[in-house]
Amino acid sequence: MLGRIIFVVLLCLPWGFFVTASDFLLGNAFGYVMIPVIMWWGAWRFARRGMFPWLAFGLIVSYFISTAMVWRVDGAWDYFFKPFNQFIVMNIWTMVFAIGVGLTSFYRWAFRKTHDSA
């Protein structure tokens, strides 16, 4: 139970903003690879059947916090993300997180279902 609570709290962090911030601050694509891997591993490890409302809640909260943080620094980093701006890059990576977490959770549930029936 504690692991699921920690996982939902981790989902609420502004991951879309973290990706753009790591790209800007580090100057490489390390964040584009590592942050989704960490989130998808967390979804595989902690997600359980029946957690979809909590997954959706965490991802929506993460999106709104990321959006607020990008608006806070909007214009300061836009030159770095040409031809897109930071808001578009953040939206793309938030969708990557959401799709990845959803698919990982579904595959974990399906894997457990087939494993238990065998």
Image (cartoon, rainbow, N blue to C red):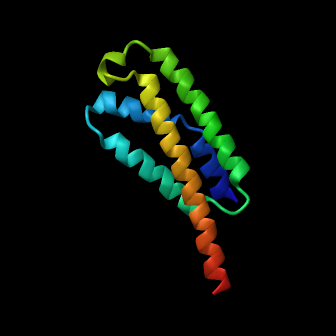
- Residue drawn at x 63%, y 67% as measured from the top left: 109
In the rendering, at what x and y percent does residue 72 appear? 50, 16
Name the image quarter holding residue 84. Answer: top left
Left/right placement of residue 78 relative to residue 108 reads: left
- Residue drawn at x 42%, y 52% as measured from the top left: 37
Q: Looking at the rendering, in which quadrant would you find the N terminus?
A: bottom right
Left/right placement of residue 38 relative to residue 2 reads: left
Q: How many marks?
A: 0
Name the residue at the bottom extreme. 118
- Residue drawn at x 55%, y 37% as measured from the top left: 13
Q: Is residue 13 above or below residue 65?
A: below
Q: Is residue 85 above or below residue 109?
A: above
The answer to which of 92 and 112 lies nearer the viewer is 92
Q: Looking at the rendering, in which quadrant would you find the C terminus?
A: bottom right
Name the image quarter holding residue 23. Answer: top left
The answer to which of 85 and 15 lies nearer the viewer is 85
Q: Is residue 31 above or below residue 111?
A: above
The answer to which of 36 and 2 lies nearer the viewer is 36
- Residue drawn at x 64%, y 42% as measured from the top left: 58
Name the residue at the front extreme. 83
In the rendering, at what x and y percent does residue 116 appear? 66, 81
In the rendering, at what x and y percent does residue 78 appear? 36, 17
Name the residue at the left extreme. 27
Left/right placement of residue 61 relative to residue 22 reads: right
In the rendering, at what x and y percent does residue 18 appear? 44, 34
